Image (cartoon, helix red, strand yellow):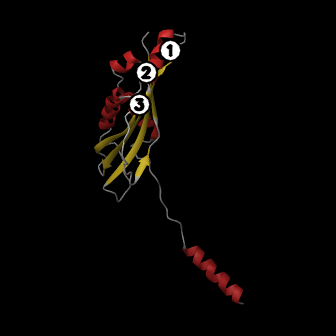
Amino acid sequence: MKKTIITIIALVFSVSCFAQKHELQFPFQAGKEKMTRFFKDSIKISDIITKKKLTGVVMVKFTADEKGAVQKIVVYYADDANLVPAVVDAVKKSNNKWVIPSGEKTHDFVMPFYIRFNLPEIDDPALQKATYQNYKNKRAIFPNNQIPLDVATLLPSVTISYDVMM
């Protein structure tokens, strides 16, 4: 009898307990594909990047307010300082396109950008030499102190490819 009563109580208790219903919406208006397309279209590869045949990663953290406006941008890491302006300009262009979780006044996002060049079909010794020189002379930008992340969302990476001039 005790087992039956305990089983009924446990069953009633378990039926009344529901998991939280939380639908996580993608933080960029219209979704991941639109975000990727937006940044691929917005990042303008400068002449410096194409002349030096630069490649690398730029990792940024930015804050969006409840209206989706970008408030501040922090560069966490960059393989080359010449890659940063294009990425920062593109993040600024994304103003008012962010959706933050309900109940928050601001939200932080961390986003990696990979910039590389398309390999030509024909082997080019000059391109190989330029790539080696860039790698050898790379002076990465990175923090020398801790950076608090608080609550940040890591967004999918965006890869930007450009054609090299021969």
Residue type (three-letter) at the residue carrying disc 3: Asp
x and y percentages locating residue 144 in the rendered image: 36, 42
Q: Mark 3 points at which residue?
A: 79
Image marks 3 and 1: residues in contact by CB distance under 8 Å: no
In space, the residues marked 3 and 2 are separated at their CA atoms by: 10 Å
Quadrant of image for the N terminus = bottom right
Q: Mark 1 points at which residue?
A: 128
In space, the residues marked 3 and 1 are separated at their CA atoms by: 18 Å
Q: Is 41 placed above or below 144 here?
A: above
Q: Is 78 placed above or below 96 here?
A: above
Q: Mark 2 points at which residue?
A: 134
Residue type (three-letter) at the residue carrying disc 2: Asn
* Nearer to the camera, 160 or 116: 116
Q: Of marks 3 and 2, which one's residue comes earlier in the chain?
A: 3
Q: In this view, does 10 lie to the left or right of 124?
A: right
Residue beneath the point at 41% across and 26% down = 138
Q: Is 10 placed above or below 110 here?
A: below
